[in-house]
Image: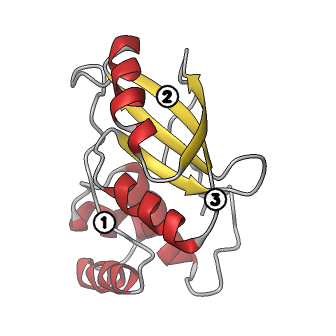
Amino acid sequence: MLHDDFNSNPPPDIDKIDAKILRALQRDGRISNLKLAEEVHLSPTAVLERVKRLTRERFILGYEARLNPDKLGAGMMVFVEILLDRTVHDVMDSFKAAVQVRTEILECHLVAGGFDYLLKTRVANMAAYRAFIGSVIWTLPGVRETRTYAVMEEVKNTTALAI
């Protein structure tokens, strides 16, 4: 949980009240405008205008519910390093497009280092992952080599940013 005193200097594009609003929305995206206004000591109208501006300026990208993967048949998290056979634009573009349509792939990051992409995936179990690696990962454009890291325990899982 982020505390108001964690970072007393907000980024230059927002003031301390905007930072309080963002922290409150990170904690509870369903907070009512009235409760948010009380929390930051502004009128509901002023808070609503600030939230609209923060959304328009893309400080707020959207709202979503965090779902329980265990309850939804996706209890196993696996990270996969991907090394492409060639790192040229057409291969990379094809790879990126193919990754976009796979719901099992939650995140895909182009990284610097000993491999090209890091994928965060979720599947039901190891049998489902074995099927996924063969039917999906190895069929992605340009994949030359993979390394798999099955998560044994999620020690920390948050999307909250320090503000």
* Residue at point 53%, 71% (across, down): 19
- Which dot marks residue 62? 1
Spatial CA span between label 3 and label 1: 35 Å
Height in image: 44 above or below 63?
below
- Which dot marks residue 78? 2
Q: Position of residue 72 (x, y in %)?
A: 21, 25
Q: Position of residue 151 (x, y in %)?
A: 54, 21
Spatial CA span between label 3 and label 2: 24 Å
Q: Position of residue 45 (x, y in %)?
A: 24, 84
Spatial CA span between label 1 and label 2: 26 Å
Out of 24 and 112, give the one closest to the viewer: 112
**Furthest residue to the right?**
113
Which residue matches tag 3?
86
Q: Label 1 neighbourhood size at 10 Å, few (<14), some (14-19), many (20+)? A: few
Left or right of residue 127, residue 115 in this image? right
Q: Label 3 neighbourhood size at 10 Å, few (<14), some (14-19), many (20+)? A: few
Out of 84 and 156, give the one closest to the viewer: 84
Q: Secondary structure at mark 3?
A: loop
Q: Secondary structure at mark 2?
A: strand
In this view of the protein, can residue 75 be seen by the observer?
Answer: no
Residue type at tag 3: Arg
Out of 97 and 11, give the one closest to the viewer: 97
Residue type at tag 2: Val
Height in image: 128 above or below 18?
above
Left or right of residue 23, residue 124 in this image? left
